[in-house]
Amino acid sequence: MLILCTNDDGYMAPGLGVLAEAAAGLGDVHVVAPDREQSATSHSLTMHLPLRARSVRERWHSVTGTPTDCVMLGVQAIRPRRPDVVLSGVNHGMNMGEDVLYSGTVSAAMEATIFGIPAVAVSYAGRGDERHLASYGPLLSRLLAQLVKRNDFPPETLLNVNLPAIAAEQVKGVRVTRLGRRVFSDSLTQGTDPSGKPYYWIGGGSIEWASLEGTDYHAVDEGYISVTPLHLDLTNHALLRNVAEWELTA
Ligand code: MN
């Protein structure tokens, strides 16, 4: 089995090492990852600049692009053949609820899904508190074996996994979940720069989640690993008819 690993934190991020090591027992691991931090770049694609790939060690390449670029190159160019599975992460920080719309980690897995390749995104819900990330190696190895060796991996679907920020030995189990929802995000800071001009800084702040039963947040909050199947189709099928009833005309 040829496994392509990537991430959005850059090829030097410890989480990628944990993932690649955990995947090593499952097959032939190749890493193609951004040469720098690319978090929150979502599904962006570099189209107006050439991309360069550099071999940083055996079967590891860094790329001057986004996570999506890395999957493009990993699937179509750098690797000896098309990968059987794509793994993205382990992201330094959770990717739950609305996060998946901004996440480069999830988008890399999504790109693989578009290529028709089974993909799993893995995130560790403890950015800034990474004490326990390294303890996840053996657990992740067991979990990934259960996820990627199936012959009924759901089509047009990626699996979004979140690991709680506790020691792997303390994890209570695995829950299959749906996306949670933020109730409040105070993530825009305004200030004045040294020359007296205003600036705005996105990020930081506090994030509150609605702790709804069955969601990724709820599971991780209770010490479980969440596994959320994400479909590529964002259509709101449940409300399609309601909008159709508007009888829009050209
Ligand atoms: Mn990241």
Image (cartoon, helix red, strand yellow):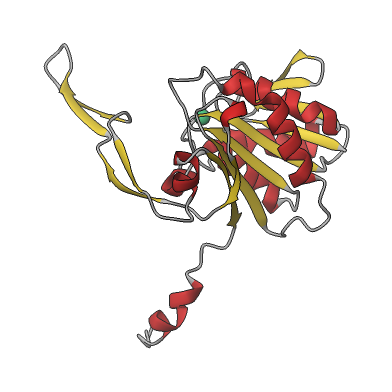
101 sits left or right of 22 in the view: left
Please state the total of marks drawn on the protein image: 0
Residue 85 at x, y percent in the picture: 77, 42
Q: Quadrant of residue 79?
A: top right
Q: What residue is rendered at 86% in x and 32% in y?
A: 27
Q: What residue is rendered at 47% in x and 44% in y?
A: 96
User: In this rendering, does residue 2 appear at all?
Assistant: yes
Q: What residue is rendered at 62% in x and 27% in y?
A: 169
Out of 48 and 218, give the one closest to the viewer. Answer: 218
Out of 189 and 149, give the one closest to the viewer. Answer: 149
Residue 18 at x, y percent in the picture: 67, 22
User: In this rendering, does residue 46 appear at all?
Assistant: no
Q: Quadrant of residue 173?
A: top right
> Which image quarter holds the N terminus?
top right
Out of 136 and 12, give the one closest to the viewer. Answer: 136
107 sits left or right of 19 in the view: left
Residue found farthest to the left: 196
Residue 60 at x, y percent in the picture: 75, 20
17 sits left or right of 84 in the view: left
Out of 213 and 56, give the one closest to the viewer. Answer: 213
> Which image quarter holds the C terminus?
bottom left
